[in-house]
């Protein structure tokens, strides 16, 4: 028999719920992907809290099929930067289509990734398609991409709400992360997030977000 325990509900009034939702909306609207980091240090306990929040995300059969590699060692950051830039150089020069390069123009990105050394922390999220049990046998995980994507979303949201900035970086291919970080074969790199404070005077592309009307459809009773 599954064991069930009482849910600790927040018990907010409708007004309180709406106020909280609107405040969160206004805060999240300020989130931007940032590539220029300040050298201002970040406390390890802060990063650990952000990762605990990320790991609270829902996951298929509650398997939590993820590992968060938390990196502040400058030597490892340098190795990651070198390997990422090698792949990115190849991608920007030969692998990405003209259409893709055109789509990226507004962001001013190129193969150089100085933020991989400059940001005080890098977090590399690995997805686990299965777990290896202590006896060496395999235990299957479910909806792994969805689950790890949700955890990444929780992490990005937590980073922003703590006043820090990040960037979803996906060097491609990224198997080099598996080697540098010596992860076992059931773990595959999913996303790399540099974390820190934004550099003073840092600028971001002048983007607009889709309005609610552009992203929402309704089915309502008459
Ligand atoms: N991975 C490359 C290219 C890149 C691709 C997309 I889609 C972006 O939104 C941004 C960059 C890079 O990191 O530069």
Image: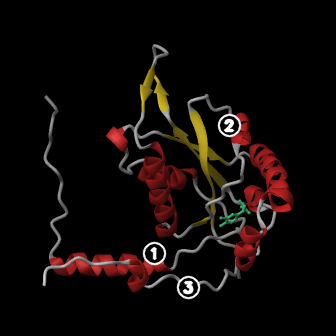
Answer above or below: position of 23 versus 74: below
Mark 3–mark 2 distance (CA, rounded to whole Å): 36 Å
- Residue 182: x %, y % from top left: 68, 32
Camera-side mark, 1 or 3 = 3
Instruction: State which tag comes first along the sequence, 3 or 2.
Output: 2
Residue picked out by circle 1: 28
**Camera-side residue of 143 and 131:** 143
Secondary structure found at label 3: loop
Answer above or below: position of 163 versus 129: below
> For the residue with label 1, is its CB less than 8 Å from the closest atom of ligand 1?
no
Q: Residue at x 65, y 70 (%)?
A: 34
- Which label was assigned to residue 209? none
- Which label was assigned to residue 178? 2
Q: Residue at x 27, y 81 (%)?
A: 19
Local crowd size for mark 3, using a 10 Å CA cut-off: few (<14), some (14–19), many (≥20): few
Point out the image quarter for the C terminus. bottom left
**Camera-side residue of 122 and 148:** 148
**Splitting the image into 4 quarters, where does residue 103 fall?**
bottom right
Q: Which residue is drawn at 15% across and 42% down?
A: 5
The answer to the question of whether label 3 and label 2 lie on touching residues, with beta carbons closer than 8 A, is no
Answer above or below: position of 39 versus 68: below
Mark 2–mark 1 distance (CA, rounded to whole Å): 32 Å
Secondary structure found at label 2: helix
Local crowd size for mark 2, using a 10 Å CA cut-off: few (<14), some (14–19), many (≥20): some
Instruction: State which tag comes first along the sequence, 1 or 3.
Output: 1
Q: Could you tell whether 124 is left or right of 102 in the image?
A: left
Residue picked out by circle 3: 208
């Amino acid at each position: 028999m599954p064991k069930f325990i009482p849910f600790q509900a927040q018990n907010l009034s409708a007004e309180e719920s709406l106020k909280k939702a609107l405040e969160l909306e206004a805060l999240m609207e300020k989130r931007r992907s940032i590539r220029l980091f300040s050298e201002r240090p970040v406390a390890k306990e802060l990063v650990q809290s952000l990762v605990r929040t990320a790991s609270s995300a829902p996951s298929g059969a509650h398997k939590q099929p993820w590992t968060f590699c938390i990196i502040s060692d400058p030597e490892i950051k340098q190795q990651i930067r070198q390997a990422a830039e090698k792949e990115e150089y190849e991608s920007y020069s030969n692998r990405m289509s003209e259409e893709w390069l055109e789509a990226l123009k507004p962001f001013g990105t190129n193969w150089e990734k100085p933020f991989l050394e400059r940001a005080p922390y890098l977090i590399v999220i690995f997805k686990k398609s299965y777990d290896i049990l202590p006896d060496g046998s395999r235990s299957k995980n479910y909806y792994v991409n969805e689950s790890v994507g949700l955890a990444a979303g929780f992490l990005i949201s937590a980073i922003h709400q703590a006043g820090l900035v990040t960037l979803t970086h996906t060097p491609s291919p990224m198997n080099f992360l598996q080697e540098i970080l010596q992860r076992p074969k059931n773990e595959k790199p999913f996303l790399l997030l540099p974390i820190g404070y934004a550099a003073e005077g840092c600028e971001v592309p002048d983007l607009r977000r889709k309005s609610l009307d552009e992203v929402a459809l309704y089915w309502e009773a008459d």
